[in-house]
Amino acid sequence: MTTTEFINPTAAKIVLAAQRGDSINRISNKIGTSYSWVYDWIDRLDAKEIISNTDNGIRVRDYEMRRRYEEMMGTLYTRDKVSQEDAYVIPHFAGMEFAYTEIDAAYVWTHGGFQIARAHDDYPVFIEVHERDIDRWIEFFERFGVDTTVDERPDAADVDGSVHYVLFPQTDDIEIEWVDGNPVIPLDDAVSQMMETRPAYEPALEMIADEHDVDINASHHDQMTTD
């Protein structure tokens, strides 16, 4: 295959989402593409020396190609509306640590089974990031034509496009668990957030209690009585 044949959105997503040590399965989950299709592309990218598939996982080798892929995907996303599905793919391209939080912690921990206070024309995505990376995150999303705010959800009328990101800067380490290829705040932290407005999150809490065999009432009794 010629280099031109590698100018492909799937190849671009694989290279952009890959972090050193990732498995093929993790990359497949990150970009929402079938394992077999990602496996096939990784073979081709490895043969072209754009990435390496080693016993210790995937690593990017050709960073000039990675830069070209980011420019290509930035152009594609600024030309068209970012879909809800791609809203959970793009942050993986940044190469910076993050974790889904707030509404998205509930969304991820319920495997997409719970949504609240979002619509097709107003879809904020909530992520924790390192405070030191805030400016880099804002610049990164600008390259993809997506608005960002810090610490607070904006009014829908103040945002261009339906998908936008709300960043929550953290001065301490970000604790992460991986669910379906998505980095998310730990389950106990997610449940604590939901308990702050329990009536709104009751369906999510029930789903989590069933799946993870967690006694929500018992483990969060102190918080409930305080509320």
Image: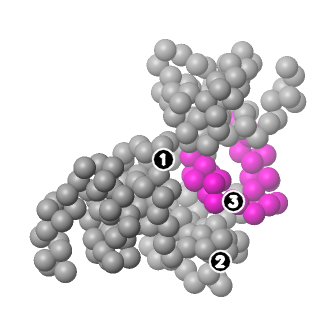
84 or 58: nearer the viewer:
84
Q: Nearer the viewer, mark 2 or mark 1?
A: 1
Q: Is residue 82 magenta?
A: yes
User: For the residue marked with disc 3, what is the amino acid?
Assistant: Ser
Q: Which mark is residue 98?
A: none
Q: What residue is drawn where x is 53% and y is 16%?
A: 54
- What is the quadrant of the C terminus in the image? bottom left
Q: Is residue 15 left or right of residue 190?
A: right
Q: Which residue is mark 3?
A: 83
Q: Give the quadrant of residue 39.
A: top right
Q: Please determine whether, in this image, residue 39 is positioned above or below residue 107.
A: above
Percent across and percent down for residue 215 are 20, 57
Q: Which residue is mark 1?
A: 182
Q: Nearer the viewer, mark 3 or mark 2?
A: 3
Q: Which residue is mark 2?
A: 159
User: For the residue marked with disc 1, what is the amino acid?
Assistant: Asn
Q: Which residues are magenta?
A: 66-92
Percent across and percent down for residue 212 are 29, 48
Secondary-structure class at tag 1: strand
Q: Is residue 38 magenta?
A: no
Percent across and percent down for residue 153 are 50, 77
Q: Residues within 10 Å of mark 3 (few under 14, many from 20)?
A: some
| Cα distance in 3D space between marks 2 and 1 | 25 Å
Secondary-structure class at tag 3: loop
User: For the residue marked with disc 2, what is the amino acid?
Assistant: Val
